[in-house]
Image (cartoon, helix red, strand yellow):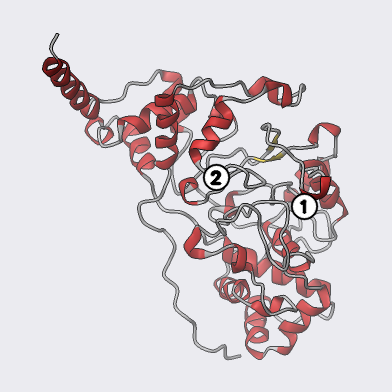
Amino acid sequence: MSRFVLGLLGVVFSLNAATQVPQFSPAEERAILRHGPWPAPWSPDPSNRASGSAQAIELGERLFFEPRLSPSGKVLCATCHVPFRGWQDSRARAAGLAEVERNTPSVLNVRYGRWFGWDGAGDSLWAQSIRPILEPREMGGSVAQAAALVRSDAELACRFAKAFGALPAADEALLAAIGKALAAFQETLVTGRTPFDEFRDALARGDAAAMKSYPPAAWRGLRIFVGRGNCSACHFGPAFSNGEFHDTGVPFFVAGGGVDPGRLGGIRKLLASEFNLLGRYSDDGQKKSSLKTRHVAAEHRNFGEFKVPALRNVALTAPYMHNGSLATLADVVRHYSELSADRLHADGEVLLLRPLRLGAGEAADLVAFLESLTERESALPERKPGAPCVK
């Protein structure tokens, strides 16, 4: 057969591939539909009386961009969670006053979380928001210093009064409220719709014409994701995360010869924290939200486990993994394709994870799918500086 004919057949095949309607098995279709709809339903946090409050959101936004929360005046929440970088910092490892061992996760869609931080040391978003304020290598602040800032700044004190009422006498109670205002703001950071969402919704309503607009490479990658790749075993639901913790074969050694204990250390920190959901600062009178904390316990298997990250906008938040050790999505796919099962926990992850052994085309398809989880347009409301607070 001549090269001309072979080339013509290739063109015809490409055109057919670009216009065909993807076909999925009933099991694959059910798995795909579970990743929506988007935006997902959400309810205010019962442990945070400021959750959903417009006044608290305004205060929280000001505090998020307030350098004086750090005694140095040089570090703020937005130092690591940079809005134009997908609300992370594009660094392998976060750096405030000094570099830490872990990558900065984006705070987009953080309101859908169950545990917070790579090790889950926060059982609420407001408790997690307090942690970097007090961490010596991040903001390097203290309970007294953060409370003094709000008490001494007329604008912040005024906005605090509108959100929470009178300033509490105890500095620790005031810091808890600062965390709740920061959480209320972060709860508003939700990504917009993606090409995957359009495809998923078209599949749900059986709209073959609309399904054709989804790139063939992306739906082939989606088939791997929900099929033999078993990616959706951990990355499931509308946010593409089960919110739990796993050992995925990424080294946990850190500079200086130490190790990052991951979830094991996180549970210990969580249970020792005065800000956890079992403590006095939770606003959940029925304590239903604290059930997860009441029953969590550190076990040896938790060593080296890290939280499953959500995948929306993942193409915008490189580098990847808890330590920022993988630079690109192609590197992440290669990691799972060439995974060493000997490195995984014998009592858990070896049952979930297997080397995918993807070919070059399959790996490219899986990356194309992950890239299709990027929002077309931001869903974040346009905010303008508010007028000065008046009591």
Q: In this view, does 62 lie above or below 364?
A: below
Q: Position of residue 237 (x, y in %)?
A: 53, 37
Mark 2 closeness class: few <14, some 14–19, many ≥20 residues within 10 Å: some
Q: As rendered, which of 194 and 29 lies closer to the eye? A: 194
Secondary structure beneath label 1:
loop
Q: As rendered, which of 116 and 306 lies closer to the eye? A: 306
Q: As rendered, which of 258 and 144 lies closer to the eye? A: 258
Residue 177 seen in render: yes
| Tag 1 residue | 287
- Residue at the spot x=61%, y=63% of the render? 80
Secondary structure beneath label 2:
loop
| Tag 2 residue | 327
Residue type, label 2: Ala
Q: Where is residue 26 in the image (x, y as percent from the top left)?
A: 41, 19
In the image, 360: left or right of 231? left
In the image, 351: left or right of 230? right
Residue reaching furthest right?
Answer: 272
Marks 1/2: CA–CA distance: 41 Å
Query: Which quarter of the rendering shows the C terminus?
Result: bottom right
Hey, which quadrant is residue 236 in on the image? top right
Residue 318, label in figure = none
- Residue at the spot x=84%, y=57% of the render? 273
- Residue at the spot x=54%, y=53% of the render? 109
Residue type, label 1: Lys
Q: In this view, does 277 lie above or below 248?
A: below
